[in-house]
Image: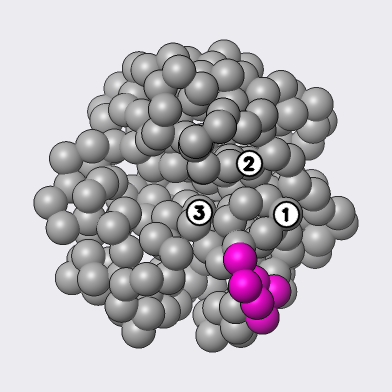
């Protein structure tokens, strides 16, 4: 179990949990061992009994639901009790017929009195629509004055147009010049399509892709963990 953070330190995890279709015991073990303050999920429950399923997942991890679920099309934000949620919301991107609906969940919160915005999003697999969705997400983030942290399954490798759209504002890729490890597919990772993108006003203490036997069983993606301070 990771040591708890205090003050203005925050551990953030972005994780595509594959609709909870894999090894749930391994998923719970992996997340609880990492002890996030803010958990930004993609492919969380969004259909039948989604409220109950999201609440049960949060309870099993010792967290609370802050935003998301069906209104955010499966993007979900869970937080621990260090985080005070001030408000929350969701957005949906324009729909391309024949494609999955996509969107994002938003939370404005406080940790030790310091304000921040947390965003979880999952961009599409269609390269024709994905950059447009990334631009809309970047515009929504730009409207928020407090520091932003974004957990996102971009469905695209670094350098692509969607990455460029998200990184044109004040967000940066903490991996920097040394590319982070690949995140997908979990069994034999070869593509880096998941990230935590961080406001330039936040300090990144560490940034890593977690690859353990438990996370390889828990989902088809690997989780991304960032330790931040304000």
Q: Residue 50 lies in magenta, yes or no? A: yes
Q: Name the residue under label 3.
A: 42
Q: Quadrant of the C terminus?
A: top right
Within 10 Å of disc 3 (Cα), the crowding (few <14, some 14-19, many 20+) is many
Expressed as whole percent of the image width and height from the top left, the position of residue 199 reads 61, 32
Instruction: Identify the image quadrant of residue 15.
Output: bottom left
67 sits to left or right of 95:
right
**Secondary structure state at the residue bearing disc 2:** strand
40 sits to left or right of 83:
left
Compute the Cα span from label 2 to label 3. 10 Å
| Residue contact between numbered discs 2 and 3, judged by CB atoms under 8 Å | no
**Secondary structure state at the residue bearing disc 3:** strand
Count of labels shown?
A: 3
| Residue contact between numbered discs 2 and 1, judged by CB atoms under 8 Å | yes
Placement of 125 over or under 16, stated as above or below: above
* Residue at image coords 56%, 29%: 96
Q: Name the residue under label 1.
A: 71
Q: Residue 98 lies in magenta, yes or no? A: no
**145 and 125: which is toward the camera:** 125
**224 and 65: which is toward the camera:** 65
Within 10 Å of disc 1 (Cα), the crowding (few <14, some 14-19, many 20+) is some
| The residue positioned farthest toward the front in the image shown | 98
Placement of 164 over or under 133, stated as above or below: above
Dot placed on the residue nearer the N-terminal end, 2 or 1: 1
Expressed as whole percent of the image width and height from the top left, the position of residue 218 reads 31, 70
Q: Name the residue under label 2.
A: 103
Placement of 205 over or under 177, stated as above or below: below
Highlighted range, magenta = 47-52
Dot placed on the residue nearer the N-terminal end, 3 or 1: 3
* Residue at image coords 73%, 40%: 91
69 sits to left or right of 210:
right
């Amino acid at each position: 179990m990771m040591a708890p953070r205090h003050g203005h330190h925050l551990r953030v995890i972005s994780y595509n949990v594959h609709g909870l279709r894999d090894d749930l015991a391994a998923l719970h073990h992996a997340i609880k061992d990492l002890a996030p303050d803010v958990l930004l999920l993609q492919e969380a429950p969004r259909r039948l009994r989604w409220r109950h399923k999201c609440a049960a997942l949060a309870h099993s991890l010792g967290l609370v639901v802050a935003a998301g679920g069906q209104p955010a099309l499966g993007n979900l934000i869970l937080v621990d009790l260090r985080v005070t949620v001030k408000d929350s919301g969701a957005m949906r991107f324009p729909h391309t017929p024949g494609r999955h609906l996509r969107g994002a969940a938003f939370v404005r919160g406080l940790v030790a009195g310091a304000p921040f915005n947390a965003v979880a999003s999952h961009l599409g697999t269609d390269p024709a629509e994905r950059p447009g969705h990334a631009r809309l997400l970047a515009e929504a983030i730009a409207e928020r004055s407090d520091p932003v942290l974004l957990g996102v399954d971009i469905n695209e490798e670094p350098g692509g147009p969607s990455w460029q759209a998200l990184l044109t504002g004040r967000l940066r890729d903490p991996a920097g010049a040394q590319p982070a490890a690949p995140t997908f597919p979990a069994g034999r990772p070869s593509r880096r399509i998941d990230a935590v993108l961080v406001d330039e006003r936040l300090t990144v203490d560490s940034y890593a892709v977690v690859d353990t036997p438990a996370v390889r069983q828990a989902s088809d993606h690997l989780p991304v963990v960032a330790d931040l301070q304000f």
